[in-house]
Image (cartoon, rainbow, N blue to C red):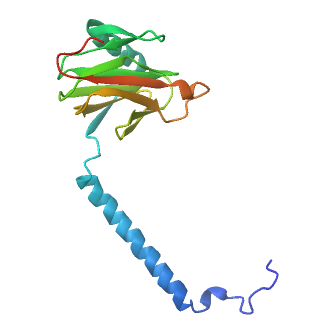
Amino acid sequence: MAIHPPENRLWWNEPVARGEVVWIGIAFLWGVFMFLFMIWWHFTGSQNLSNEAYRIDPAVFAERTELAAEPYIVGEEGETGIPVVHPPPGSDLYMYARLWEWWPVLELERGQSYRLHLSSLDWQHGFSLQPVNINVQVHPGYELVMTLAPDRTGEFSVVCNEYCGIGHHTMVGRIRVVEPGQGGS
């Protein structure tokens, strides 16, 4: 109940003020522009990944990841003991997320192309490759496959950006990019 109700109880039949019509028109046109801009940017922005997704049992994905990493282990990551894997260029890489780690650490060669397979073994996680703007959701039971071709060397952080529990803030993985022929940590 209003303190001072309008005289005419059918207020929606009252004419709309010219200023309000102008602002409604501007808001509508801006919304149409943004909608069309998003479609245009999808095709011309060069930031959308061409990826594939498949259903997979988490235990099967864990086994594939460990089998794919085993022949190419070149060291271990500091105090965590997570293996550093340096697969040959053009190969399929596997990385999984689980509370609260990314496994394994990948070492790639600059200018080479790889197919990265991602999945989660437990909860939904977010794969955010920093400072590169790659950001995807990683779900248990789904294998996400994308093509990577690193164009600069350095150490890149893989950050989980989907809250996954009490240790979420510690869930940081690594992808190292080295010059061709310099692998092996």
Point out the image quarter for the N terminus. Answer: bottom right
State the residue in front, 178 or 125.
Answer: 178
Identify the residue at horizontal 35%, vertical 69% (top origin): 33
Residue 57: percent from left, percent from top? 39, 21
Which image quadrant is residue 114 in?
top left
Residue 56 seen in the figure? no
Identify the residue at horizontal 28%, vertical 37% (top origin): 51
Residue 38 seen in the figure? yes
Q: Say whether residue 118 is left or right of residue 13.
A: left
Identify the residue at horizontal 27%, vertical 33% (top origin): 146
Point out the image quarter for the C terminus. Answer: top left
Which image quadrant is residue 167 in?
top right
Residue 184: percent from left, percent from top? 26, 11
Residue 117: percent from left, percent from top? 31, 26
The image shows residue 74, relative to residue 45, as above or below, that is above
Residue 177: percent from left, percent from top? 28, 24
The image shows residue 48, relative to residue 55, as above or below, that is below
State the residue in front, 174 or 119.
Answer: 174
